Image (tube, rainbow, N blue to C red):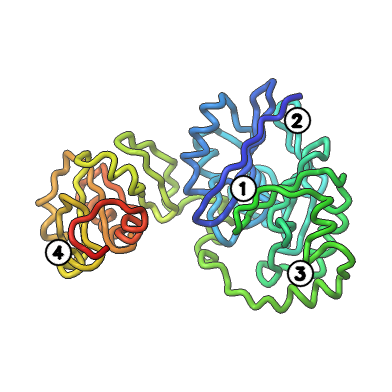
């Protein structure tokens, strides 16, 4: 049986999404999808000729919003999460030992609480691959100080459910912040500085409970959204703008990357909503940009052509994101926010007028 396998990455949250497909039937599952990447994932699924049986989250994430609900609208796929999460809109409330089939293959859910109390790992049927969420990372593990986490439970989960897998079993985590992509059970049992070697439960608990980490930046947005399986408040499914390759954020903003804007100069109106002193300041401005400060936009919106797309720009992308909402309310349909604003534009060495080198 041939396994189709792809490892995908979201740079904003350093999240890995995993696509597993059956080569014969073309049925697949998607593990830990990210809301902003649902359009990307959809394109890959279509190109590979796959059908999605289910999306599976390893836990209720605190650093990004799941793409499960959006993908269900597109593919009619089931949504699977740990039963302990009691998440609304889930189709599969998974418990230890449950199997999710895709064609001739399946993954088995293993309860691995500790990072959160609902955490699951998914193990391919032949135990050659395991997707461990935040329970076991590459030379690390998830934190245990929120969402009913427990250092004792995490130590037990890793040693009884993951370190008992075959040593050549490949381990794929939900995150990595150093660019590492895969490890193995044997490596982690030997080299993991938190859980491997001769480290005892007492050693681990003493270490993990004194990390003193700040809470994830997105926790107040991500956790409530993920308890709804990523369903937006307005309940709108994903649509498909065709004028540019856009990314839709959970905040409801269409974003566009600087590379496309430079390569397609003239295809859209560039609206700069900074103040005049910023427009001519150190960051400079994009050639041909129309300067309308955000505070004046409502009164001057007629200066823009509704028949042409608009790319909104500011220093970092915050004010310009608000501008896209204002334009939408004013009847503009083809609008996007420049991701990262002029800071990203300059960091990417795109051409500017004015400014300092």
Q: Residue at x 44, y 41 (%)?
A: 237
Residues at circles 2 and 1 in contact by the CB criterion of under 8 Å: no
Counting residues from the start of the chain, the first of labels 4 and 2 encountered is 2
Counting residues from the start of the chain, the first of labels 4 and 1 encountered is 1
Whether 112 is drawn above or below 45: the answer is below
Counting residues from the start of the chain, the first of labels 2 and 3 encountered is 2
Q: Which mark is residue 32?
A: 1
Residues at circles 3 and 1 in contact by the CB criterion of under 8 Å: no
Give the structural element (helix, strand or loop) at label 2: strand
Give the class, few, some or many, for how many residues have Cα within 10 Å of label 4's Cα (few <14, many ≥20).
few
Counting residues from the start of the chain, the first of labels 3 and 1 encountered is 1
Task: For marks 4 and 2, give the CA distance.
Answer: 58 Å
Q: Which mark is residue 105?
A: 2
Q: Residue at x 79, y 53 (%)?
A: 111
Which residue does the numbered mark 3 point to in the structure image? 150
Whether 263 is drawn above or below 60: the answer is above
Give the class, few, some or many, for how many residues have Cα within 10 Å of label 2's Cα (few <14, many ≥20).
many
- The answer to which quarter of the image holds residue 2 is top right
Residue reaching furthest to the front: 357
Which residue does the numbered mark 4 point to in the structure image? 296
Residue reaching furthest to the top: 24
Residues at circles 2 and 3 in contact by the CB criterion of under 8 Å: no
Picture coordinates of residue 32, whole percent (x, y) = 62, 47
Task: For marks 3 and 1, give the CA distance.
Answer: 22 Å
Task: For marks 4 and 1, give the CA distance.
Answer: 42 Å
Q: Is residue 335 visible?
A: yes
Q: Residue at x 59, y 35 (%)?
A: 77
Give the structural element (helix, strand or loop) at label 1: loop
Give the class, few, some or many, for how many residues have Cα within 10 Å of label 1's Cα (few <14, many ≥20).
many
Counting residues from the start of the chain, the first of labels 3 and 4 encountered is 3
Q: Quadrant of the N terminus?
A: top right
Q: Is residue 150 left or right of residue 314?
A: right
């Amino acid at each position: 049986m041939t396994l189709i396998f792809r490892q995908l990455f979201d740079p904003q949250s350093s999240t890995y999404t995993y696509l597993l497909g059956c080569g014969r039937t073309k049925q697949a599952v998607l593990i830990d999808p990210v809301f902003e990447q649902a359009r990307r994932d959809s394109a890959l699924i279509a190109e590979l000729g796959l059908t999605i049986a289910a999306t599976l989250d390893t836990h209720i994430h605190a650093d990004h919003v799941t793409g499960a609900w959006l993908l269900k609208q597109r593919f009619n796929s089931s949504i699977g999460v740990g039963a302990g999460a009691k998440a609304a809109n889930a189709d599969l409330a998974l418990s230890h030992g449950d199997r999710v089939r895709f064609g001739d293959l399946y993954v088995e859910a293993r309860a691995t609480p500790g990072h959160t109390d609902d955490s699951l790992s998914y193990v391919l049927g032949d135990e050659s691959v395991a997707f461990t969420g935040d329970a076991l990372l590459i030379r690390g593990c998830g934190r245990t100080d929120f969402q009913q986490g427990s250092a004792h439970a995490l130590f037990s989960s890793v040693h009884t459910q993951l370190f008992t897998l075959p040593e050549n079993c490949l381990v794929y985590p939900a995150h990595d912040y150093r660019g590492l992509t895969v490890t193995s059970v044997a490596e982690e049992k030997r080299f993991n500085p938190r859980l491997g070697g001769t480290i005892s439960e007492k050693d681990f608990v003493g270490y993990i409970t004194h990390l003193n980490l700040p809470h994830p930046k997105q926790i107040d947005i991500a956790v409530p959204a993920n308890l709804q399986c990523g369903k937006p408040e307005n309940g709108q499914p994903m649509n498909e703008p065709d004028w540019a390759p856009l990314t839709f954020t959970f905040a409801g903003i269409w974003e566009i990357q600087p590379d496309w804007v430079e390569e397609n100069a003239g295809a859209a109106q560039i609206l700069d909503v900074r103040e005049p002193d910023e427009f001519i300041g150190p960051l400079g401005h994009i050639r041909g940009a129309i300067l309308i400060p955000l505070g004046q936009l409502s009164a001057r919106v007629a200066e823009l052509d509704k028949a042409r797309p608009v790319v909104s720009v500011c220093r970092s992308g915050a004010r310009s994101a608000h501008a896209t909402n204002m334009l939408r309310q004013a009847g503009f349909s083809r609008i996007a926010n420049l991701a990262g604003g002029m800071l990203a534009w300059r960091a990417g060495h795109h051409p500017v007028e004015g400014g300092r080198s």
